[in-house]
Amino acid sequence: MMTITKPLTDLDIANNATLKPITEIARAAGIPEDALEQFGRYKGKIDPNKIPGRPDGKVVLVTATSPTPAGEGKTTVTIGLADALKQLNQKVMVALREPSLGPVFGIKGGATGGGFAQVLPMEDINLHFNGDFHAITTANNLVSAMIDNHIHQGNELKIDPRRIIWKRVLDMNDRALRKVVVGLGGPTQGVPREDGFDITVASEIMAVFCLATSLKDLKERLSNMLIGYTYDRRPVFVKDLGIEGALTLILKEAFKPNIVQTIEGTPALVHGGPFANIAHGCNSIVATQTARKMADIVVTEAGFGADLGAEKFMDIKARVGHFRPDAVVVVTTIRALKMHGGVDKSNLTQENVHALLLGIKNLERHIETIRNFGIEPIVAVNRFVSDTEAEICTLMEWAKKNDIRIARTNVWAEGGKGGLDLAKQVLEVLDQPKQFAPLYDVTEPIEQKITTIVQKVYGGIGAVFTDQAKRQLKQIEENGWSDLPICMAKTQYSLSDNPKLLGRPEGFTITVREIIPKLGAGFLVCLTGDIMTMPGLPKEPAALRMDVDEKGDAVGLF
Amino acid sequence: MMTITKPLTDLDIANNATLKPITEIARAAGIPEDALEQFGRYKGKIDPNKIPGRPDGKVVLVTATSPTPAGEGKTTVTIGLADALKQLNQKVMVALREPSLGPVFGIKGGATGGGFAQVLPMEDINLHFNGDFHAITTANNLVSAMIDNHIHQGNELKIDPRRIIWKRVLDMNDRALRKVVVGLGGPTQGVPREDGFDITVASEIMAVFCLATSLKDLKERLSNMLIGYTYDRRPVFVKDLGIEGALTLILKEAFKPNIVQTIEGTPALVHGGPFANIAHGCNSIVATQTARKMADIVVTEAGFGADLGAEKFMDIKARVGHFRPDAVVVVTTIRALKMHGGVDKSNLTQENVHALLLGIKNLERHIETIRNFGIEPIVAVNRFVSDTEAEICTLMEWAKKNDIRIARTNVWAEGGKGGLDLAKQVLEVLDQPKQFAPLYDVTEPIEQKITTIVQKVYGGIGAVFTDQAKRQLKQIEENGWSDLPICMAKTQYSLSDNPKLLGRPEGFTITVREIIPKLGAGFLVCLTGDIMTMPGLPKEPAALRMDVDEKGDAVGLF
């Protein structure tokens, strides 16, 4: 038995874990030797074209109630569930998003799970990993350099520098780059214009990367990305610049899914990571589909709560990838539900059954959403030490009374063992027949598709459109871009578009401020509020605590 | 025999080469298994701390006459010489710089050698390689984000936004980023100020990375980087921001040297690539020293001609790394010497012995330079098909008459076989005693160090200083930063600071316009002209020809 003098951090636990060589993990997963490229001893890339065909595995989607600062542990449950399924002798794989590098230096917190439910090596995955995001940054910024060079060299396409919608990116939290003026310094230094930098995960290339089903499809999507308009308002695409080949070349190695392992040795494909607000917030289709070629069950997650991540998973990712989720887990915590019931963050350790019952309405709404897609969800109650028996019982009884599948998980502390009950229920659901269908048809009018999401997912009355959104809607229709799925950009904290309305707000409308066509990704982004596409650093950035020790190991990463 | 219907490109030759697994290359080089991390099948990184100690190998530096558009093939000769030494049963390794990604999309031309003297896989090395430059870009831009965040959050250090000398970087040819204004958009978006982007190879972090002798030294140097001045003109360093630990963490994996192979299977460490003008233009010290721990002979190169690259190799890199070059090869071509003798680029295929004799004076000056360091150089005449017997004879006779070692090379067409004569002469020189010493002592006054370089390397009279340079000189002395080596930033095309004066100009002075302290790298940069630190793209960028074929292979990369 360990004598614990201070609480273990995720990095401590990760550093104490014994990793297997990635060659061994890959071999056990049935990956042919020539399909694996090692990146160091514990990471690799897989060539999807070298994986032999077999019946595709089933997909388990892990989503959550509306996120709160209390934390739900969605990634942790995703990993713990996979480890539990492995303990039950299932052939299982995890498919996760890659963490963004920028936020690592800002506010503490990674995206590799926690406690004894982590993917490893967490240090490498949270830093440069296998260079995928760097490749996406490079591709994105080549587009910008080519646009400015085109204008500088004579502007044959007559691109209006005031109507360029393509922005530069960096994988860095850097607020000073949100709004910049480039091209200053006189005639030899380019043409001055307003521009801005987004964080890399907000690049359309990230969304394209995650939705492309093959290298050929990747190139096709890249070529269709809209970069701006001419002086006479005609759209200009990447294909007009003629660089879709170069962009594909920049991305071709990154496009191969990365393989790592959980603490318990379950293979994990960690690949791609688009924003869950202005993009669809899921790992790459190529990783999910590659995992399905090797495992009977693939456990994957989608960003934020079920209103955003799960909706987009089913209406965008599953539609493009031609698959369906075979089971959906909705992660929640007693703490988070109490916050949705009105408790302040500082009082969450106090028992409060009344607030819990109010907060359960948020969970209830997300359950209805999943049912609207034709799937019966399983609620996972992710354990925190402050949970009281009375609270737990209240939640379990509510579930029983309403005929809702529910399981307690304790994966942070116990790893896969803490997810066995959930895993058993998932296996039961996987065996049942289901009637999955997306919520809308892409050929429906745009307003109708949006209204469907507001009503069937958010529980609101409908959508109202600003004048700007109406103008953009008209322009999109005129250009023939209407028949695309909708990618809602809404606050994750509320089912409504007001982040302060926790729980289950009712009777609200959603205001659509802007509709932005993303023609490479193949969706229409509906902005319903100020969406931050370039975060800033806090007053005390996490970078200040980071270091390398004398052995060359990371310090203070988490 | 091959039937050649059109000339083979470097990419054709590279694609036709049969590569050995990097594990095999490493094993043959005596690298312990646990010191090698594979990056795919044909690339790796080496942990220098896991290489067993033994007597250090000797160092052969390859430099050249002043570069011309005709091309000298310095990297090609470096690789071919190593392959030739291997054919002569020497235990040899190559140590080269990594190519910068940005220029790859601009004007055709890589930095991985050519013909049958290349390092492979050229496609990967010329694209993201093992992510080193991306890590350097990230570290550089974290410094910028932390500076702007510090000012935004209250500016406790009282940094003057007008006196920040630290710039952002991207590994991209992007002229529109040379001069920008950041922090626009109001009080929540940072503080507006003038800024600019350099290309990544111009980052001081690149120079630091290449001069650091250990991870500890890397951190120390990073902490000493000067980022600007306060309102009352006090210097502000990275250590004042407290992020040297985070920067070291970002760089720690990149800091391990990369191993690849030549077409003939000679192990090559390709690591780091600072600009040869505003920095010292050599691969990393850690790669050179790691190679010396494994090979009896390490063949390496330095950027541009001997006046820049070799001078900095000996006065900066060798001084910091506590080693000496044991032999120096000066690469030249008949074509380049004819250009130095006044022939226009369009007439280089015509025999012109008279011009050749005039141009030889450029070679002569570089030979004197190497002798000034106490080393007897070997001239390598790198073959081009247009060379005539009369021209070759003229050059060989001149060398014989002046008692200069000379060897003909034909490595582009023949690989190592075309470098055997050169290799034999290198082996002779390695056996001879030599009296190497840097040209100056760092404790000499700055003006004196500069004058020494102008007189003993460029063949000029002396240096003149602009008023700005004089002010900066005074400031450097007041701050106690004088005792550092000099890093001259001068045009590579001429021995003087006027790029149009080819051959061997005489009686000139060098105008020092600015003196910039690089306190992490540990040198004083002397700007003697407009030095371009962010290239632009041409009217027809190479990116337009790039693609990926149906097999997923690169097209049009070179």
Image (tube, coloured by chain):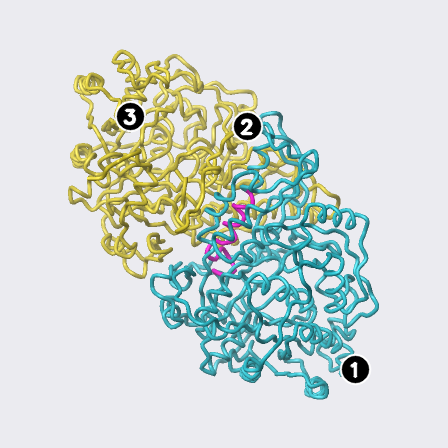
Chain colours: A yellow, B cyan
Which residue in the structure is indicated by mark 2?
Answer: A472
- Secondary structure beneath label 1: helix
> With respect to residue B191, does B291 lie above or below?
below
Q: Are marks 1 and 2 on the same chain?
A: no
Q: Which residue is mark 3?
A: A332
Counting from the top left corner in percent of width and height, residue B291 is at 47, 67
Where are the magenta residues, as a range? B124-141
Crowd rating for badge 3 (residues with CA inside 10 Å; few <14, some 14–19, many 20+): many
Q: Residue at x 30, y 46 (%)?
A: A268
**Number of other residues with Cα within 10 Å of mark 1, as a class: few under 14, some 14 to 19, many 20 or more:** few
Q: CA distance from mark 1 to mark 3?
A: 86 Å
Q: Nearer the viewer, mark 2 or mark 3?
A: 3
Q: Residue B73: say if magenta.
A: no
Q: Find residue B159 and report its horizontal and vertical position in percent.
A: 64, 34
Q: Quadrant of residue A446?
A: top left
Read off the chain for label 2. Answer: A
- Left or right of A276 on screen, residue A409: left
